[in-house]
Image: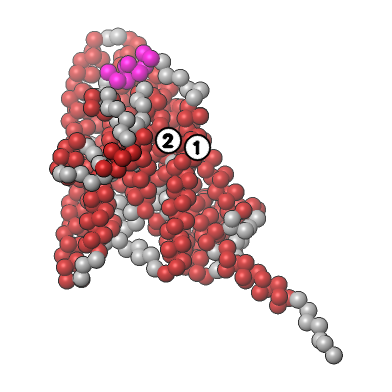
Amino acid sequence: MKSSNQTRSPRRTSVTKWSLAALIAGIGFGLFGHFSGAAVFSTVGAIAKPIGDVWISALRMLSLPLALVLTLSAIVGSKAKVVGALGTRAVVLFVVLLITAGLFTLTVTPVLLSRYSVDPATIAAMNAGTAIPQSISTASPTSTGGWVGMLVPRNIFEAAARGDVFPLLVFVVFFGLAVTQLSDEHRAPIARAVQSLTQTMLVMTHWLVIATPVGVFALSYLLALHAGGSLAGMLGVYLLLQPAVVLLVLILLYLLSVTIGHTSLTRFARGVAPAQLVAISTRSSIAALPALIEGGRRHLRLPETATSFVMPLSVSLFRISHMISPFVKLTFLAHVYGISLRPGAVVAFFVAEIAFSLSSTGIPNSGGGQGYRSVPIYLAAGIPIEGIIILEAVETIPDIFDTLVNVTGQMSTTTILSRASRLRAESASTEAAEPVTEVV
């Protein structure tokens, strides 16, 4: 999944455009081959399949170590130091809202998908072009006690070989926390080594990203060749579903800002509107930070502590879209492929996405590493990587809505956290305005 908060470089934008063009071309040629039945398209498919397989294998090989290294780097070398009681309250609020958004998405998405029925022939065609691990597709549900016991693997290398991502993330988190407790003399060399390893992984990721249009073309061509027009219809449904869920969460944020943040709907809407316009045009909430600060000061009358500390902290740490779009994608792909999500896998996905959301700060964005680190979480839930890649190629439109909800959430959290100080200021202003009656 892409981060909506990092500034896009021209090269990254170029890769995104080429990937989208490759997706359209792959679907177009695949559909033509599906309906025409000409032998030449089968020959092209035979050539495209090994190309797609090699790219997928490289992606599988890189995604897990990349996820672990980026998470460790965020903990060991994080630039965002949460200090003081206000920072602690902010992080607690972030986590609560992330959990709420995730639960809301998991509840609403299946309801919206209930009217979208996938033809069994389409599922068979999609599954024919993808490889669902037998161990995942036939696994029995894990008990709560058994799942908790799996959080600490006996052998981290065996866990990596099985694709048990969450236990590895737990190990990396505790390892990173242990490093932060060391003296500067011992911590600094480890931090430098982790940063160097992170940069190396991102260089490798950049190499892989360059080949993304080729891989996307091969996969989309093969899927369209087997599934026919159902692939185009599937993408259309997804491009309607994701914005719909995001807009529902957006409405909830407005309501929370009014009720808990103690402000009027009109005032909040005016305060956040300039930042929303920047978010839509740039797809970067960092670029929207000046507009957030200006709107908060002018329309919401946020105090200095809110605009100078809480708001930058929110932009750095709080990305509510991380708990919306990934869950929409997870639920949608499970519905399309006919996969029953195991409770343990959903919980692992849930906790990992919260960790990814809060650990995104301080991580350099180079060539799409932010999106690839979520791939192993989908794989652990049993989702074929081909489906993940196809939806990733059309993320340009959903990304606009992701950034929109992110900046709205950042303004909302700042409004809620500054409620007490604003109420005190309003009370003091009211008392100062009251006439003083002299007692004779």
Residue depicted at x 36% and y 37%: 346
On screen, residue 132 versus residue 318, left or right, reads: left
Front residue of this view, candidates 121 and 283: 121
Q: Secondary structure at mark 1?
A: helix
Q: Is residue 306 visible?
A: yes
Graded by Cα atoms within 10 Å as few (under 14), some (14 to 19) or many (20 or more), the crowding at tag 2 reads many
Quadrant hosting residue 106 = top left
Instruction: Identify which residue is drawn at 76% across, 76% down.
Output: 434
Q: Is residue 142 above or below residue 66?
A: above
Q: Are marks 1 and 2 in contact (CB under 8 Å)?
A: yes
The residue positioned 21% from the left and 53% from the top of the image is: 198
What colour scheme governs how the chains and residues are painted in the rendered image of this protein? secondary structure
Q: Residue furthest right?
A: 440
Q: Magenta span covers which residues?
A: 120-128
Task: Residue lying at the far front in this picture: please name it.
Answer: 145
Q: Is residue 120 left or right of residue 214?
A: right
Q: Is residue 124 magenta?
A: yes
**In the displayed structure, would residue 405 be above or below residue 19?**
below
Residue at the spot 42% in from the left edge and 19% down from the top edge: 118
Q: Is residue 256 left or right of residue 357?
A: right
Residue that label 2 marks: 328
- On the image, the x and y values in percent for residue 419 come to 58, 63
Q: What mark, if any, has residue 245 been given in the picture?
A: 1
Of callouts 1 and 2, the N-terminal one: 1
Few, some or many residues within 10 Å of mark 1 (<14, 14–19, 20+): some
Quarter occupied by the N terminus: top left
Instruction: Specify the amino acid type for callout 1.
Output: Val
Residue at disc 2, secondary structure: helix
Quadrant of the frame with the C terminus: bottom right
